[in-house]
Amino acid sequence: METKEYIESGILELYVYGSLTESESEEVAAMAKKHPEINAEIIAIEKSVVALSSSFSPFQSAENYAKIKEKLNLKAPEVIPMAPKKNWSQYIGWAAAILLLVGIGFQYNQLEQTNNQVVNATIEKSKIEKERNELVLEKTAIETTLAVIKDENNIVVALGGQTVAPESSAKVYWNKETQKVYVDASGLPEPPKGMVYQVWALKLNPLTPTSIGLLDNFDKNDQRFFAVNNTGDAQAFGITLEPAGGSLTPTMEQLYTLGKV
C-alpha cells in the first residue's frame, strides 16, 4: 500500500484514538518511523484532537479527556473491503494466445491448400506432358505412315481374306531398294487374348515361309501400321494367327490373309 493510501485509510486516526490492537499499533508505529510523512500526519491528528478537545472544554485536564474518550467508546470506522483490481494483463495475454493459435491455424490451413494446389498442379502438368508425348508419338506415326504410302519406290501388295476370315484384308509396302517392309493391318480384326499376328515372306516353288515379324501390341497401335523385318526375294506375303510369341512355321488353318507380289 502506498503512503498516501495508508494515510487516507483512517488507520492513523484510530491509532491516535487508541482503538487499534497492540499488533496494529506496532505496525503504525513502524510505518511512522519508516515514513516521515506518516509520522507528521500522526502529529497533525494529535494536535487536531487536542485542539478540538480544548475548544469544547478548555479547562478539562488530560486525565478527564481520557475518561471522556473512554465513555464515548469510540469505535473504529467500518472498513469497506475493496475488491482487488482485475489483472487485465492476464486476460489480454490469454486473448493474444488465442488469437495467435487462430492465426497459426489459419496459416496452416492456407499452407495445406497451397501444398494441395502445388500437388494438383504437378499432377496436371505430368498429365499434360504425358498427353503431349503421346500426341508427338501419334503425329510421328501418322507422318511415317503417310510417307510410306506416298513413297513411289514402294511396291504395294494387297492381301486378301482367306477361309478362316474371308472379310479380313491387309497391305504390304515393300521397298526393294531398302528392303524395308511395312504392313497396314487395319483390315484385320483384333486378335484374341494370348494370340498374335505373324507375317510371313513366302517363296512359292517350293513353298518356303520365312517369318519377318509379329504385329505386337495390336490394340495399342491406333494406325494399325507396323514395321517388320527386311525380306529377300519374296514372291508372296501371308499373315497367320499364332500363339503369343509366334511360331517357327505358319499355322495354315489360321491363315488370315495372303497376297502375291
Image (cartoon, rainbow, N blue to C red):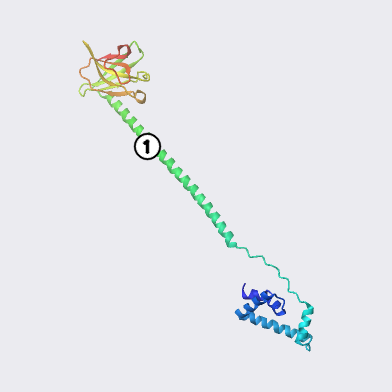
Q: Is 53 placed left or right of 9 in the picture?
A: right
Q: Residue furthest bottom?
A: 59
Query: Considering only vertical position in the picture, is 92 above or below 116?
Result: below
Q: Position of residue 72 (x, y in %)?
A: 79, 78
Residue nearest the viewer, comparing 156 with 208: 208
Residue at image coords 55%, 57%: 96
**Circle 1: element type:** helix
Q: Quadrant of the N terminus?
A: bottom right
Residue designated by label 1: 129
Where in the figure is residue 240, as x and y percent of width and height? Answer: 31, 16
Say if 99 sits above or below 259 in the image. Answer: below
Q: Position of residue 247 (x, y in %)?
A: 28, 17
Residue at 31% x, 28% y: name it: 141
Horizontally, residue 3 falls left or right of residue 244, namely right
Q: Is residue 14 left or right of residue 213?
A: right
Quadrant, the C terminus:
top left
Amino acid residing under circle 1 = Glu
